[in-house]
Image (tube, grey):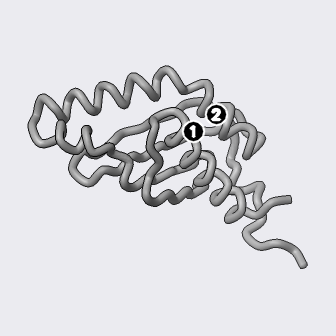
Amino acid sequence: MKTKGEIEAEISEALVRFEIDYMGRGPTESRSYIIEDMILVRLQGVLTAAEQQLAKNADGIELVKKMRQALIESAKSRLSQVIGDITSAKVREIHTDISTTCGERVFVFILDRNLEKELPRKRNT
């Protein structure tokens, strides 16, 4: 059985691949945390150069957020499948937001069970 840390690393890698494949650009950094029945993913450096320019005024910020939200809405089933394949848990809901100030995106995946409780913290040797 994979450890909590190994699964968190696999989730981070999968979300980086998703961002590259689906959004056209990957984050500069990715961290994932399994917390009870939730997975928290923090992606840093996700904004494109064009989005950074748009985010310099209120209308641009709104446009970037709406566009990114629409893209994620259309990819929710794909994201759920990615997380499900890695964790063997069903994703009940996905929450996300993007900061146009610091260029970070966060995902919170709500699972059908307490995954953290099931996973070993260390590999048995």
Q: Residue at x 45, y 53 (%)?
A: 42
Above or below: residue 88 compared with residue 13: above
Q: Look at 73% across and 69% down and name the residue there.
A: 121
Q: On screen, 65 above or below 105?
A: above
- Compared across the picture, whether 121 is left or right of 98 comes to right
Q: Judge whether 92 appears above or below 124 on screen.
A: above
| Position of the N terminus by quadrant | bottom right
Where, by quadrant of the figure, is residue 117 drawn?
bottom right
Q: Nearer the viewer, residue 36 or 24?
A: 24
In the image, 14 versus 125, the foreground residue is 14
Amino acid type assigned to the residue bearing label 1 in the image = Ile
Q: In the drawing, does residue 28 fall left or right of residue 101?
A: right
- Rendered location of residue 95, percent (x, y): 45, 35
Q: Quadrant of residue 102?
A: bottom left
**Mark number, residue 110:** 1
- Give the CA separation, mark 2 to mark 1: 6 Å
Tell me the residue that label 2 is attached to: 91
Residue 94 in picture, x, y percent from top left: 51, 33
Quarter of the image containing the C terminus?
A: bottom right
Q: Position of residue 89 (x, y in %)?
A: 73, 39
Q: Are marks 2 and 1 in contact (CB under 8 Å)?
A: yes
Q: Residue at x 66, y 40 (%)?
A: 83
